[in-house]
Image (cartoon, rainbow, N blue to C red):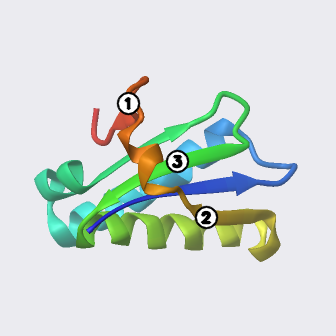
């Protein structure tokens, strides 16, 4: 199953914090599923201001990345500090720049 999720963040978030949370989430998923699988099933892109993060999820390891990321974000910023919504399927066929490749 392929899903694209958009996390939106309230004031107080920054790109560095989001990137750090994502790095820990990816590491945690790699511990369970292995690096190659996570690289194939998860990718992300954080905007320059740190107000949004788009995560492309395909498979169990990608879902694990998103779940851990959401938990870390909730602890760091608070439960009400972010929103998550599924992007319409057409958005995942976007032909612009691709999300950052996980693990590079």
Give percent across and percent down for residue 100: 39, 33
The disc, 2 or 3, on the residue closer to the chain's N-terminal end is 3
Q: In this rendering, would 14 be left or right of 73?
A: right
Q: Residue at 17% of width from left, 53% of height from top?
A: 35
Select label 2 or label 3 by which is in front. Answer: 2
State the CA–CA distance, disc 2 to disc 1: 19 Å
Give the quarter of the image for residue 32. bottom left
Q: The residue tagged with tag 1: helix, strand or loop?
A: loop
Of helix, strand and loop, which one carries label 3? strand
The residue beneath circle 2 is: 85
> Mark 2 touching mark 3, by CB under 8 A?
no
Q: Are marks 2 and 1 in contact (CB under 8 Å)?
A: no
Residue 75 at x, y = what percent?
68, 72
Q: Are marks 3 and 1 in contact (CB under 8 Å)?
A: no
Distance CA(mark 3)–CA(mark 1)? 11 Å
- The foreground one among 101 and 91 is 91
Number of numbered labels in the structure image: 3
- Residue at 75% x, 53% y: name it: 9
């Amino acid at each position: 199953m392929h899903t694209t999720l958009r996390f939106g963040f309230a004031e107080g978030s920054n790109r560095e914090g989001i990137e750090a949370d994502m790095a820990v989430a990816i590491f945690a998923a790699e511990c369970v599923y292995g690096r190659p699988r996570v690289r194939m099933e998860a990718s992300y892109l954080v905007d320059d201001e740190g107000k949004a993060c788009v995560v492309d999820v395909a498979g169990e390891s990608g879902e694990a990345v998103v779940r851990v990321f959401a938990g870390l974000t909730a602890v760091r910023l608070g439960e009400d500090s972010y929103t998550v919504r599924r992007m319409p399927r057409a958005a995942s066929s976007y032909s612009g720049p691709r999300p950052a490749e996980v693990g590079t």
